[in-house]
């Protein structure tokens, strides 16, 4: 059924558009053109300028921006894949901290530290100088404290 219709259309000669129709179509287009132009002028010029600048900056480097976005997606995916969400069980943590070997090692470290540093009462406090050293130049400065 469609084949017959298509064949009939192919046999039809192509006729030019009547000049009256052409003038009517062009007149309607001319009337519509100033309205579109005035809308563009009514919008703020700085927005149009910014849009033009941004499109000029980003269009030529579209492949570069796409590649950069792909690299960031890969970085984020690797970061999420490398994350370790499995925390050790609380019982395991408590057992590791309170094991007898750990406690013994901590006591030995504390004893060694006190032997190296000594206790504060073992060392008498060193005598501090009562006055700070004077200036090294020949000129004497007088300081006034308020």
Image (cartoon, helix red, strand yellow):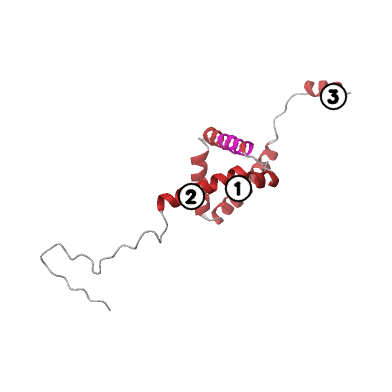
Question: What residue is pinned by disc 3?
Answer: 5
Tell me, yes or no, whether the two marked residues, 2 and 1, touch with CB atoms within 8 Å.
no
Look at 31% across and 62% down and name the residue there: 126
Position of residue 41 measured from the top left corner of the image (x, y, whole percent): 54, 54
Q: Along the line of sight, which residue is nearer the eye, 125 or 31?
A: 125
Q: Earlier in the sequence, mark 3 or mark 1?
A: 3
Residue 11, by quadrant, is: top right
Q: Which mark is residue 33?
A: 1
- Of the two numbered discs 3 and 2 in the rendering, the one whose residue sits closer to the viewer: 2
Q: Quadrant of the C terminus?
A: bottom left
Question: What residue is pinned by disc 2?
Answer: 111
Q: Along the line of sight, which residue is nearer the eye, 20 or 78?
A: 78
Look at 62% across and 46% down and name the residue there: 97
Q: Main secondary structure of the magenta part?
A: helix
Q: Along the line of sight, which residue is nearer the eye, 20 or 86?
A: 86
Task: Say left or right for 116 vs 17.
Answer: left
């Amino acid at each position: 059924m469609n084949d017959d219709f298509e064949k009939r259309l192919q046999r039809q000669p192509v006729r030019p558009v009547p000049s009256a129709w052409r003038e009517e179509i062009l007149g309607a287009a001319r009337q519509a053109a100033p309205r579109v132009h005035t809308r563009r002028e009514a919008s703020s010029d700085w927005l149009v300028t910014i849009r033009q600048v941004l499109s000029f900056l980003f269009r030529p480097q579209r492949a570069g921006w796409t590649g950069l976005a792909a690299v960031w997606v890969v970085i984020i995916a690797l970061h999420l894949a490398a994350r370790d969400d499995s925390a050790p069980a609380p019982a395991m943590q408590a057992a590791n901290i309170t094991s007898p070997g750990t406690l013994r090692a901590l006591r030995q470290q504390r004893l060694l530290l006190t032997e190296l540093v000594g206790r504060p009462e073992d060392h008498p406090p060193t005598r501090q100088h009562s006055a700070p050293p004077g200036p090294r130049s020949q000129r004497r400065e007088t300081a006034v404290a308020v």
